Image (cartoon, rainbow, N blue to C red):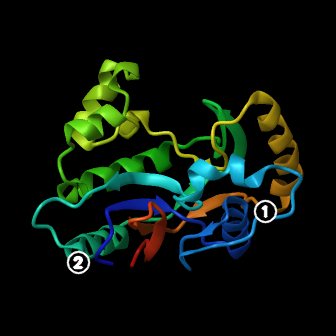
Amino acid sequence: MQGFKRYAIYYAPESAVFADFGKRWLGWDPLAGCDVPHPPYELPMDEITRTPRKYGFHGTIKPPFRLARGVDIGALHAAATALMAGMSPVRVEALKLKRIGGFLALVPEGDATELKSMAGKVVKALDAFRAPMTDADIARRNPARLSDHQLDLLHRWGYPYVMDEFRFHLTLTSRVSPELAERTREVLDTTLPDILPRPLKIRSLCLFGEADDGNFHMLHRYPFGG
């Protein structure tokens, strides 16, 4: 697990059907660490998945971070193992397709309070392993477009969309035009009903690492309850 630029804690589907859809849709298998062919949809798949592809199919829980100076990845692994062993599965009624700021993603349907609470707990518990943000890190978050509260979260936790600003989502596309978004939605509306788990039960989280080429790899899955 050594040798990665950044690490993150993500939700990654346990269901083989759901996970297989995600890796084929995006064209990247983070567990095997390799490209996979897109399904033969009549869509410009390389174009619409260019941005989310490198991250793999996931829902962010603790956003990507560099390890703090003097911290060994083994210590992060041990802390994550212990943390997840003390957590219980989280249930989400369902997932639905939604357009968010120009991209399409799967978001929770129904009450997501339990999910938000779990994510906040992970962000807090593992924050000691995160290196402080640099000025360049802050600039990349476009601080002029953030609210005062989001700026406070950025400086405190390294990301503006955590805690009460957390919005769980599994990204499916890059930012696309309204016309291309509608074409993509039509394809997904016929594909997703047979794939999406209902309810979604989150029973584990995963450690991901960013390689030098920018692609994220799944390094370990931590089951809740040990």
With respect to residue 52, does 136 lie above or below?
above
Percent from the top left, x then y, of residue 71? 15, 67
The residue to which callout 2 is attached is 74
The residue to which callout 1 is attached is 195
The kind of secondary structure element at disc 1 is loop
Q: In the rendered image, is residue 84 in sight?
A: yes
Q: Amino acid at mark 2?
A: Gly
Q: Residue at x 71, y 54 (%)?
A: 46
Q: Residue at x 74, y 71 (%)?
A: 17
Figure quadrant of residue 84: bottom left
Check the picture and name the quadrant holding the C terminus.
bottom left
Q: Residues within 10 Å of mark 1 (few under 14, many from 20)?
A: some
Q: Residue at x 50, y 64 (%)?
A: 89
Percent from the top left, x then y, of residue 34? 58, 75
Figure quadrant of residue 129: bottom left
The kind of secondary structure element at disc 2 is helix
Q: Amino acid at mark 1?
A: Ile
Of the numbered discs 1 and 2, the one sitting upstream in the chain is 2
Percent from the top left, x then y, of residue 167? 50, 39
With respect to residue 85, does 199 lie above or below?
above
> Depth check: 116 or 37 in front?
37
Percent from the top left, x then y, of residue 138? 28, 35
Q: In the rendered image, is residue 95 in sight?
A: no
Figure quadrant of residue 81: bottom left
Q: Is residue 179 left or right of residue 204?
A: right
Which residue is situated farthest in the left direction here? Answer: 70
Q: Which mark is residue 26?
A: none
With respect to residue 96, does 151 lie above or below?
above
> Depth check: 97 or 186 in front?
186
> Depth check: 159 or 209 in front?
209
Distance Cα–Cα, label 1 vs label 2 = 35 Å
